[in-house]
Image (spheres, coloured by chain):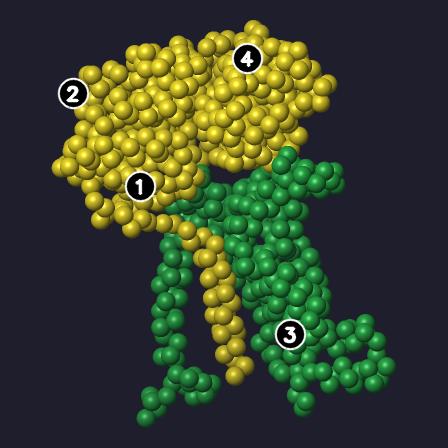
Chain colours: A yellow, B green
Amino acid sequence: MTPTMPSRALITASAAALSLTLAACGSSGRTAGGAGADGTLAWALTQGSEATFRASATQWNKDQPGSKITYQFFQNDPYKQKLRTAVGAGNGPVLFENWGGGGLKSYVDAGKVADLTADLDASPAWKNRIFPSVLQSATFGGKVYGVPVNGVQPVVLYYNKDLLQKAGAQPPKTWDDLLALVKKLKARGIAPISMGGASKWPDLMWLEYLVDRVGGPDTFADIAAGKKGAWSAPAVLEATRMIKQLVDEGGFAKGFTSVSADTGQAEAQLYTGKAAMLLQGSWGYGSINTGSPKFVSEGRLGWAGFPSVAGGKGDPSDMVGNPANFFSLSAQASAKEKKTAVSYLKDGVYNDAYVDSLLKNGDVPPVKDLDAKIKASANADWSSYVYNLTRDAKNFQLSWDQALSPELGDTLLTHLDQLFLGQLSPEQFCVQMDKAAAK
Amino acid sequence: MSTAKTPAATRQGGPPFVMALPALLLFALFALVPMAIVVYLSFTQWDGLGSPAWAGTDNWREALTSPVTRHALWLTVKLMVLSWVVQTPLSLLLGVFVAGRQRYRALLAVFYFVPLLISTAAIAVIFKNLLDPNFGLGAALNLPLLNQNWLGDPQLAFYAVVFVIAWQFVPFHTLLYQAGARQIPASLYEAASIDGAGRLAQFWHITLPQLRYTVVTSSTLMVVGSLTYFDLVFVLTGGGPGYATRILPLDMYITGFQSNEMGLASAISVVLVVAGLLLSLALLRFSGFNRMRSQQAGM
């Protein structure tokens, strides 16, 4: 019996190890609805514009019984992985929601996305109603691979009017104002800025804005183009030093590194009066409005653009954020599915009812000539602020983690997290990012 | 005639090999074949969308030299050792305690076993909220000692993870020890008390040696299991802050499904499988699991 023991042991051990390992990594998924769904399938996200999508599909299917649209909704983070797995395996939907930028480009490069340029050119009314700066995020090599379907998402500085008043201060116009305000608020025992640092991407908004304010849009254009040493540009170094100073001076609320941005806790700190300011995308307005409708209706929520930096090259009107979410068409769609999808994107999206539904949610679509509609909407103050901001911005920078390749975007977020934690110095950050970009 | 029985079957005298076939086929289909594909993928570059392109040993060089992966490996080892050190004494003592037949012990056992009923994701979400510095337990009860930045401080986060893992798994191992302790014949204790052995002496000289194999079983599960902790850490910290809790399975997942470097992720997962195999083998070898015999011969 002894001679057979090692091999038996080997098999038992392999079985144990493998089954456990497999259990850990087995989570790829396929939907049952992939192939057999009724109508032209569209995949979209649960948060944000779900209500608008649902209503528009119901209306569309009533009006066009011959060419139905069927939606399936997914949560944000699992969605990215699910889409990639499904499209990679040839089981993707006909229409899929995405963020444009580098993420969409990887699908385009793999030949998975249909070119919409010809369809848009055939219908100038459709093409011309969309803000060109927004369409840019889904345009690669002069070809359009996606059209926006919901509202613009610029990043703005929210503040609690009560707390600023208590400190006897105005919302900061310049970076020096901001630093002075931090001192003032701290002296009164008020946490200056709340942030969902555990999610990492809110950190990025500070870097994006500061690099733009200090060095102008060219700095990131060099980074996006993969120029050697672009991460060590003086503007990046300066911006990371400013971040370090803000962190060291206690600008961010205690424990910001464990606050998750997905649970609305950073917003809660603002409207419960625990922190005075929050830098967040326009969706933050919705979270605050849901969390504390009274706080918004009583006019205690304020908002402003990101402060300017003395001597910086960037225009103070420059915005960062997500221009919008897009719908892209699968290259594998049949001719009939394609026809349905294109006519839905043209006539089903951004029609009157659709725009009204978006505005009702405080979502401002990047569509021209909406001023009258916005004035009449429920959140008129906020919506027209966002609308004008986006329309007048000299540059609307797509969030870097979306603009860069997913690989570099992930490294960037982790390194930036370490910068905020004080584990990396500004110099180390620049060197490490250059190294990662050179790979 | 000699073909009727395979030599192995004759020698072992066990059931024929055919009976193991269905299980082996499933094992091959769902474990060996994917494993072979992963080994192949580890030599390619693939973002999950196009088709894999041959990359030679690039991924392996990256996986074996990258400070991130090396740090992840170190964290995994640290997690394994710490988990064992924290969980084994706790569950051993608890298990022996609840093995007693008294009513109050049975009642307490019910409370101890509650974590077994909660799914991992739920546990992670609960603790994420409890440990929150602004709205968590410490802030609610106004306890400065509890009100730390548990999951946001790179020094603390790792130990917070070790604690939550222990909270989740101690009940299971307690159950093993309870069953083990109840198997110990009462006559041993009677004999010992006649000889004048106190409670402590009884624990050291009877309970502990009698539980030897339970310790081996429980330790094997802990050690091999700690290689695959994923869901809890993923929901609790997502590997952060920085790289503070990015253990190897998490590193594999983030590399594969967030950075979309399937080739590199495959190389990491092969490292994980090999480490798991070696550990299981070593445990089998040195713990005497193979030679397990009844300890109650002659009772």
State the CA–CA distance, disc 1 to disc 2. 29 Å
Q: Residue furthest right?
A: B196
Q: What's the residue type where badge 4 is placed?
A: Pro
In this rendering, do the residues under marks 2 and 3 share a single chain? Answer: no
- Identify the residue position indicated by label 4 in the image: A307
Task: Estimate the x, y position of residue A232 in percent, counting from the top left.
Answer: 54, 21
Q: Closest to the observer: B85 or A224? A: B85
Are callouts 3 and 1 both on one chain?
no
Q: What's the CA distance linking mark 2 and mark 3? A: 77 Å
Residue where numbered disc 3 is placed: B180
On the picture, is A369 further left or further right than B266? left
Question: Residue B289 in the image: x percent, y percent?
Answer: 60, 74
The disc labelled 3 sits on which kind of residue?
Gly
User: Mark 1 — residue?
Assistant: A72
Q: Do labels 2 and 4 touch, CB within 8 Å?
A: no
Q: Quadrant of the C terminus of chain B?
A: bottom right
| Label 1: which secondary element | strand
Q: Earlier in the sequence, mark 2 or mark 4?
A: 2
SS assignment at label 2: helix
* A46 horizontally vs B220: left or right: left
Sequence-wise, the earlier of marks 1 and 4 is 1
Please tell me if label 2 and label 4 are on a single chain.
yes
**Quarter-wise, where is residue A218 in the image?**
top left
Which chain is indicated by disc 4?
A
Instruction: Decide which of A352, B145 is in the foreground and name it.
Output: A352
The residue indicated by pointer 2 is: A122
Q: Quadrant of residue B116?
A: bottom right
Q: CA distance from mark 3 to mark 1?
A: 50 Å
